[in-house]
Amino acid sequence: MSEQRRVTLAAQHGALLQALIEAKEVPAGRLLGLPDLPSDDVWVDTAGAAALTRVNPKTITSWLTRSGPKRCPFPSPHKILYRLYWKRSEIEEWLQGAGVITLASD
């Protein structure tokens, strides 16, 4: 039997945030059941969205509940397999539209 490794939302968020801050390749993989995306776009979950926006994962869920932030609402997630996902490109477009400066060097 293989041993299952449990990863918490906080641990996943921390690892993704650290990779973005250090301008390293962000770990991304395909998940069975998620539709393929064109080019180099990937699906991100709540931890990934929080890392990209540099906020706590609970802030993302709060924004979704309250349709926030008020001046530039966060993109609606795609509900796939009972979970919430965003295209990374949608999050990056939102960041540009909201006038947010990211920490990652391009």
Image (cartoon, rainbow, N blue to C red):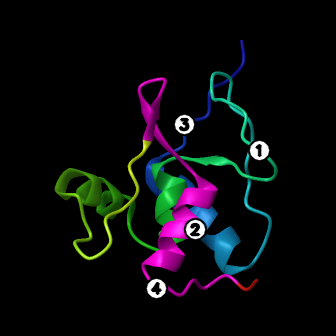
Mark 1 residue crowding within 10 angstroms, few (<14) / some (14–19) / many (20+): few
* Disc 2: which residue: 92
The disc placed on residue 76 is none
Earlier-in-chain disc, 2 versus 4: 2
Q: Amino acid at mark 2?
A: Glu
Q: CA distance from mark 2 to mark 4?
A: 11 Å
Question: For mark 1, what is the residue?
Answer: 38
Q: Earlier in the sequence, mark 3 or mark 4?
A: 3
Residue 95 colored in magenta in the image: yes
| Residue type (three-letter) at the residue carrying disc 1 | Pro
SS at mark 1?
A: loop
Question: Which stretch did the figure color magenta?
Answer: 78-104
Q: Amino acid at mark 4?
A: Gly
Q: Earlier in the sequence, mark 4 or mark 1?
A: 1
Cα distance between the residues tagged 3 and 2: 28 Å
Tell me the CA gap for discs 4 and 1: 26 Å
Comparing 12 with 100, the one in front is: 100
Asked where in the image residue 63 lies, by quadrant, the reply is bottom left
Would residue 69 be counted in the magenta stretch?
no
